Amino acid sequence: MSLEMAEAIRQLTEEGGYTKESVKHIVEDALISAYKRKFGTSENAVVRFNDDLTDVSLYSRKVIVDGVYDPVIEMELEDALKLSPDCEVGDEIEILVDPHEFDRGAVQTGKQTAQQSFKNFQKDSLYSEFKDKVGEVIIGYYQRERNGNIYVNLGRSQNDANNVEGVLPKKYQSPRETYKKGDRIKAIIEDVKKTNAGAQIVLSRTSSGFVRKIIEVEVPEIYDKIVEIKNIVREPGYRTKVAVFSNREDVDPVGACVGLKGIRIQNVIRELEGEKVDVLKYDEDPRMFIANALSPAEVSAVIILDETKRTALAVVNESQFSLAIGKQGLNVRLANRLVDWNIDVKTEDQCDEIEQITAESRKVAESLFSDDIHEEMDIENIADLPGVDIRVAEILKDSGIELIEDYLDAVDSGKINSIDGVSAEDNDKLQKIIDSVCEIVDVPAESQEPTEAAQEGAEFAAAEEDEEQEEFECPECGARVTEDMNTCLNCGVGLSFEYEEE
């Protein structure tokens, strides 16, 4: 093998980035293809490399025979003895082939085979290289644009013709950004697709992972695992919210990400072309986390409405309401995604109105239901009262107080205080139950001094009673009789009464 071939192999392995195995296969395929073009077969072609692959030799393996039928694969014993005195008929011998003896057609075939092998190797190596880099940030240069998609040169410089090309689809471009040819573009590898041309490297500048990678570069505490990014949500081009947590009590996670005078977070914002970035503290308590997620608004209180459905109410001051909602609801929408809760934002006045309406509605409903219940329930016994202590009811029953009316009379007379086993606290509870269930009507006592009309009515009633009860004497026995009697009850004589006109 010539020195030029040895130098080419060295350059491929040391400078071209090819592995020794790949170079070995490419050169071997090229020589065997040229051999086949020259001799019509490649079955007896043998390629041998030295240990460091700096040299290669091509051999033609032939069988020693006595009478050659095919000179490509056979060799006369007489000719073989000149090369190896110990050979015999039936042995195989390898004859060195000089590639310089190949004609133009054989050389062209070997060259084409080598070129195709290099292309296949580049395709496979390109896919193998970048499929493991998904999620990593890469820097390239704007090369061209087609149908809104930007094609990015991912090589060392924008002038390198052998560089790899990536595509930045329109849906993965921030609405804030515009590019022109030659501009530097930093993006994250979103996906790698295998194609006939090798691999298509899909880039993105809108994913949350892109912001995460930028922050990790700017904040050493994240690389050292002191500060941890819990979650990132983003509306590309408008706002990003980052929840961070510190594994050390003496390290403020928000301060570490913002940096001295905000220099760290400003570098992130600059890379995002001015997109707003809110860095907030993660908290295990959902109330605190929700309050933090609504930053930059200040939240007065957070009320968990339904923990199972993950719904909550955030109460803010009137001056903070628009800030908590954000433009077109962007701030609260990002907060919902960040904490994974459905957050409803209300002002303090709105909450008071809702509470007042709810209280009034509840009061009306309770009054309606309580009226129906009281109408349906006709409770007389203490034991039938809802919520009454059975022990107290039994003690009162043993003491002769079973009815509610009897109990109230005992309370008024003070008799209730002399019953053993019924404390003042028991009496208070029972009295409250009676007041809530029963309607007590006080009947006013009659006045001792009747009015004039009452006196006249009484006198008239007495006169009528006197007239009705006028008595006479029986003419036979002298017993007392009244005009409504037909016979005397004493002697049995018949009676009749006659009245004379005055």
Image (tube, helix red, strand yellow):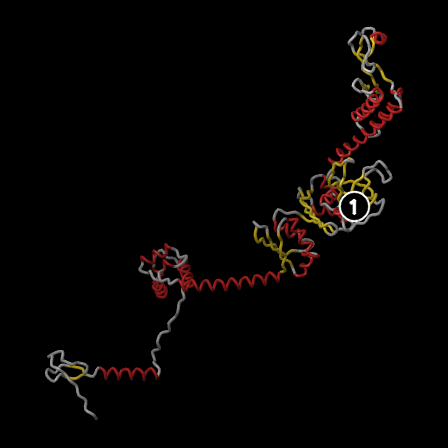
Q: Residue furthest bottom?
A: 502
Image coordinates of residue 45 in percent, x first then y, are 81, 18
Number of numbered discs on residues = 1
Q: Answer whether residue 260 is visible to the viewer in this image.
A: no
User: Is the residue 49 above or below the residue 349 in the image?
Assistant: above
Q: Which residue is under mark 1? A: 149
Q: Answer whether residue 115 is visible to the viewer in this image.
A: yes
Q: Nearer the viewer, residue 68 or 138?
A: 68
Classify the position of the C terminus by image quarter.
Answer: bottom left
Query: What amino acid type should be assigned to the residue bearing mark 1?
Result: Asn
Image coordinates of residue 481 in percent, x first then y, are 16, 81
Q: Residue furthest front?
A: 69
Image coordinates of residue 214 in percent, x first then y, are 75, 43
Residue drawn at the location 68% of the way across and 42% of the way down = 228
| Residue 461 placement, left or right of 85 | left
Q: Nearer the viewer, residue 266 or 203?
A: 203
Instruction: State the image quarter where residue 429 is shown.
Output: bottom left
Residue drawn at the location 37% of the way across and 62% of the way down = 379
Image coordinates of residue 433 in percent, x first then y, are 42, 60
Classify the position of the N terminus by image quarter.
Answer: top right
User: Is the residue 79 above or below the residue 155 in the image?
Assistant: above
Q: Residues within 10 Å of mark 1 (few under 14, many from 20)?
A: some
Please, what secondary structure does the residue beneath circle 1 have? Answer: strand
